[in-house]
Image (cartoon, grey):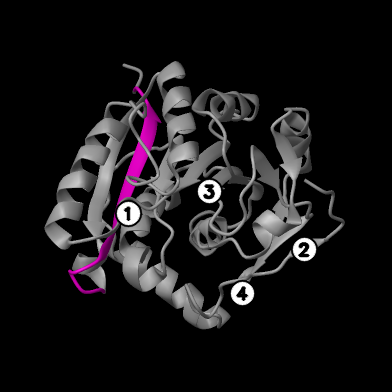
Amino acid sequence: MAHSVQAVRPAAVAGAFYPGNPEQLAHEVDALLAHAANHHVRPKALIVPHAGYIYSGPIAASAYAAVAAMRPRPTKVILLGPSHHVGFKGLALPGADALATPLGQIEVDKELVERVRHFPLVGESHLAHRREHSLEVQLPFLQRALGTFTVLPLVVGVVGPKEVARVLDAVWGGPETLIVVSSDLSHYLPFEQARVIDAHTAERIGALDGTELASEQACGAEPVRGLLVAAREHHLTAQLLDLRNSGETAGDRERVVGYGAFAFSAAEKT
């Protein structure tokens, strides 16, 4: 993966997956957060969907509303999502100093970049990030929920779960650090079939067991499986926050896409 000197990764899907107008975008995200149920959970990590906001925005908001309620709020975000356009092995940094959305720029955390750069499977790829929406659609939610934060953005290619878990270990941090994995669930199945398959996937995620999780069940299977290994090692518990599909939000029911939001938290000290 070639080195890139690009300073800012510009928004690629503003105006398509979410509003391109800053005021409209802020209003839409705030409305989604305001309508989300309060699950009273303090997540260390999240799995959230990444479709257009009209489809998966309410499901994603159920996770980000929990983040917005955290005090103190995290100041660092580790953001992982699958590659939809470029095939490669490993995990790709953007080779950028900041990521842009209509709401402003988010600084890429240089210290966290240095912590993961030495892994053989971590490289830089401007190409992997250039058109990728799986990370980008999370950023406006994070901007409205957290305010100011830095980000470590990693597009995930073909890589084993243990390798992903090792990278997460290197940047795990404390309560200042939030891990976000971007993944939709099943794709283009009839409504009822999707509900059955997605419910099974949610059950496996809840059990922190990604051994049978494939891209047919979750397009972000690689980062999800890595997070599940790390969550088990760090003694986190998973909670399902929302599970729906596009047939329940804004699409027809012939060919739907599944969406799930999950929070991973440390056991409460008594």
Left or right: where 75 falls relative to 68: right
User: What number is the disc on residue 102?
Assistant: 4
Secondary-structure class at tag 1? helix
Magenta span main SS: strand
Q: Are marks 1 and 3 in contact (CB under 8 Å)?
A: no
Residue 192 x/y as whole percent:
12, 57
Q: Quadrant of the N terminus?
A: top right
Q: Are marks 1 and 4 in contact (CB under 8 Å)?
A: no
* Type of amino acid at the residue the image marks with label 2: Val
Other residues around mark 3 within 10 Å, as few (<14) / some (14–19) / many (≥20): many
The furthest residue to the right = 5
Mark 1 against mark 3, which lies toward the viewer?
Answer: 3
Q: Earlier in the sequence, mark 3 or mark 4?
A: 3
Mark 1 against mark 2, which lies toward the viewer?
Answer: 2
Q: Earlier in the sequence, mark 1 or mark 4?
A: 1
Q: Which residues are drawn in magenta?
A: 251-267
